[in-house]
Amino acid sequence: MNERQGKLLAAIIDQFIQTAIPVGSKRLLEVGDFCCSSATIRSEMGLLEDEGFLEQPHISAGRIPTAKGYRAYVQEFMAPSSYERKVRKRFDELKEEYFQRKDQERVYEAVALLARMIPNVAFATVPHKNRVYFMGLANALKQPEFQMNPLLACEVAEFLEDKLDWLLGNVEIDDHIRYYIGDQHILKAVPSCSLMVTSYAVRGTKGAVGILGPMRMDYAYNTVALDMVADLLKSYH
């Protein structure tokens, strides 16, 4: 196959990839840089067909590539696609979506881990989403305080669903564990409870992770557990 035939084969395959329509000589002259006549192109197409690189599905139709033609194309004649910029942009968008999903999964897993370590509610803000994820409510409601007073249990559930997100936007959160205990004004909706919270960072995105439970919670144990889970999240890059 000479240089012109190779260029012709590549042009036919590029067109067929885009349109799925058999390619004729007229179309090739419109889209390609060929310094020859339509008759010359038809002749070269005939030679490529004779050599098995192209085929003609109908007598009056243009040509389409064969498997042999595609093999020659990818091995010798394929050039960077004119859509490369579009492909790269789409890849970057999907890559960011992929990493954001992984960020969220890490936080979900960290909250699940913390909830398994403590008899209280574990929670964290979800990266790239305006919401708070929590687990362990069933464990917390088994505590004697809530077993003896169902109203307190309802207050805790309502607080988690409706007010925790607001609270986390209105308290100081940093690398230190902060304690909000009992009837402090910030917890007036659940005066029977205490809240512990600290910050985490995943790929530069900061959030909050913490524990909610009765005032009788084991602060020393929970502090160690929360600190370790926060460090685990900070270890991701």
Image: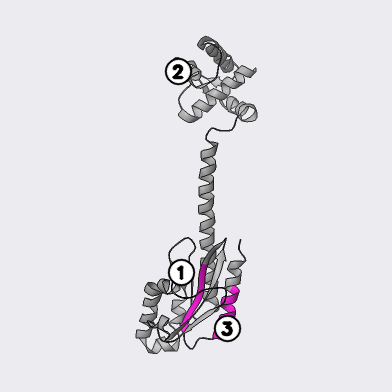
Of label 2 and label 1, which has the lower sequence position? 2
- Camera-near label (2 vs 1) is 1
Q: Secondary structure at mark 3?
A: helix
* Residue tagged 2: 61
- Camera-near label (2 vs 3) is 3
Instruction: Please state the horizontal and vertical placement of residue 191, each as a whole percent of the image.
Output: 40, 86
Viewer-closest of 227 and 143: 227
Viewer-closest of 5 and 67: 5
User: How far, Cα to Cα, is label 1 from label 3?
Assistant: 22 Å
* Magenta span of residues: 207-228
Q: Residue at x 58, y 14 (%)?
A: 47
Split into 4 quadrants, where in the image is the N terminus? Answer: top right
Q: Secondary structure at mark 2?
A: loop
Q: Residue at x 34, y 85 (%)?
A: 151
Q: Given contact means CB atoms under 8 Å apart, are the residues at marks 2 and 1 in contact?
A: no
Of label 1 and label 3, which has the lower sequence position? 1
Q: Given contact means CB atoms under 8 Å apart, are the residues at marks 2 and 3 in contact?
A: no
What is the three-letter code of the residue carrying label 1?
A: Tyr
On screen, residue 2 above or below 227? above
Can you see residue 87?
yes
What is the three-letter code of the residue carrying label 3?
A: Tyr
Local packing at callout 3 (Cα closer than 10 Å; few below 14, some 14-19, many 20+) is few
* Residue tagged 1: 133
Q: Secondary structure at mark 1?
A: strand
* Residue tagged 3: 221
User: How far, Cα to Cα, is label 2 from label 3?
Assistant: 79 Å
On screen, residue 226 above or below 204? below
Q: Given contact means CB atoms under 8 Å apart, are the residues at marks 1 and 3 in contact?
A: no
Instruction: Please state the horizontal and vertical placement of residue 95, each as a whole percent of the image.
Output: 54, 50
Instruction: Please state the horizontal and vertical placement of residue 42, each as a whole percent of the image.
Output: 52, 13
Instruction: Find out whether residue 44 is within the magenta segment.
Output: no
